[in-house]
Amino acid sequence: MPFSVEKRNGTFLGIFFVAIIALVATILGDIEAIKKIGISPLVIGIVIGIVIGIVFANTLHDKMPSSWESGITFSGKKILRFAIVFYGFRITFQEIADVGLDGFLVSLIMLSTTFILGTWAGVKLFGLDRDTSMLTASGASVCGAAAVLATEPVLMAQEHKVAIAVSMVVLFGTIAMFAYPVMYTSGVLDMTQREFGIYVGATIHEVAQVVAVGGINGSESEMAKSAVIVKMTRVIMIAPMLIVLGIYLSFMAKREGNGVAGAIKIVIPWFAVYFIGVAGLNSLIQAYIATSSITVANSISIIIENINFIDTFLLTMAMSALGISTRFSKFKGLGLAPLYTALLMFVWLVLGGYVVVKVIC
């Protein structure tokens, strides 16, 4: 137990160590130049964590007290789940309803097809292991690094596989962030503002990247609003996706264990269910704000903003912890398979997403 009498001090020191890294990542993420290119503190956190992982874990491991490991593990597992639950304060069901049925359908189609394609291609075409394939697919299909983190507890995947998936999300999400505006302004994409906003929200990886691309015509434009709302629709879909994934993995584990698909123990990722509950609570809160006085509305909004700030910091801690825990010796043998898998999904998101948006919208 991480907080037993014997481990308590080491656990707190490990958590404090991770928190310092997350603080540095948060400060860097608040620099205007970094904000403009859509790099979130989560991504900075895992990069810094991996650098520290190289220095400490891969070269000077004995210099970092082993007693800290329980705190680092706690940050990468328990704090992660807590942060995913409170991510629901960023979403309301009203926003999802506002985007309309077509926006919802585009999100659903792109999420499901991208996840299935990425998982299948990674395993069957490129010889990648199941966990890395699913983690990479979840990042591309839902919401980037946060989705990779949310999927990790369901798969019980190793830290280096999470780092690989996040790196693929960062690479192709960054490419998309620069390529999409060029395609739109050059006329390659024959789309209205609303169509392009839905396209951006349904196919670009990170929330920050969607905000950056969707706002090229102004943060209050129809394009920007459509992009963000469709993106948040994808985000909330992480919960049912993880529940279905948990049921599927339970079924497969039972079948592979004894060949009998009888009484299957269903493993439900409860943090995903709680995430939906928090989103529902936030929906009620936002409805209450709409009917309240300006003073009350502002006070509640400030509380929600602070919750979201703390939640981002906790997610950054989780990313930092995963980075520290990464051992680069485990990357050997993977070759270019993760890159090929992520590239195939990127091509599908760009081309397939365009077709889906034009057909549905």
Image (cartoon, rainbow, N blue to C red):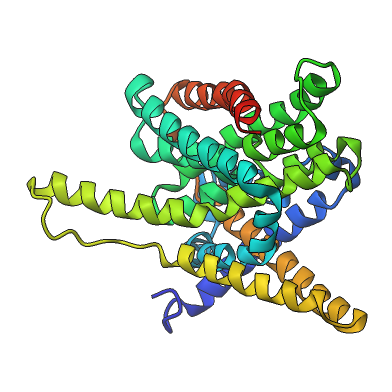
Measured along the vertical axis of the image, is residue 179 above or below residue 64? above
Query: Horizontal and vertical percent for residue 205?
Result: 63, 38
73, 214: nearer the viewer: 214
Measured along the vertical axis of the image, is residue 293 above or below residue 218? below
Q: How many numbered marks does the figure carry?
A: 0
Measured along the vertical axis of the image, is residue 269 above or below residue 343? below
Quarter of the image holding residue 236?
Answer: bottom right
58, 1: nearer the viewer: 1
9, 340: nearer the viewer: 340
Residue 328: tell me if it is visible: no
Q: In which quarter of the image is the N terminus?
A: bottom left
Query: Horizontal and vertical percent for residue 89?
Result: 66, 67
Relative side of 213 to 85, left or right = right
Q: Quadrant of the C terminus?
A: top right
Residue 261: tell me if it is visible: yes
Query: Horizontal and vertical percent for residue 75?
Result: 54, 64
Relative side of 10 to 181, left or right = left
Residue at image location 51% in from the left, 37% down from the top: 109
231, 223: nearer the viewer: 223
Residue at image location 49% in from the left, 57% down from the top: 239
Residue at image location 49% in from the left, 33% down from the top: 114
Residue at image location 45% in from the left, 79% down from the top: 3
Query: Horizontal and vertical percent for residue 235?
Result: 59, 51
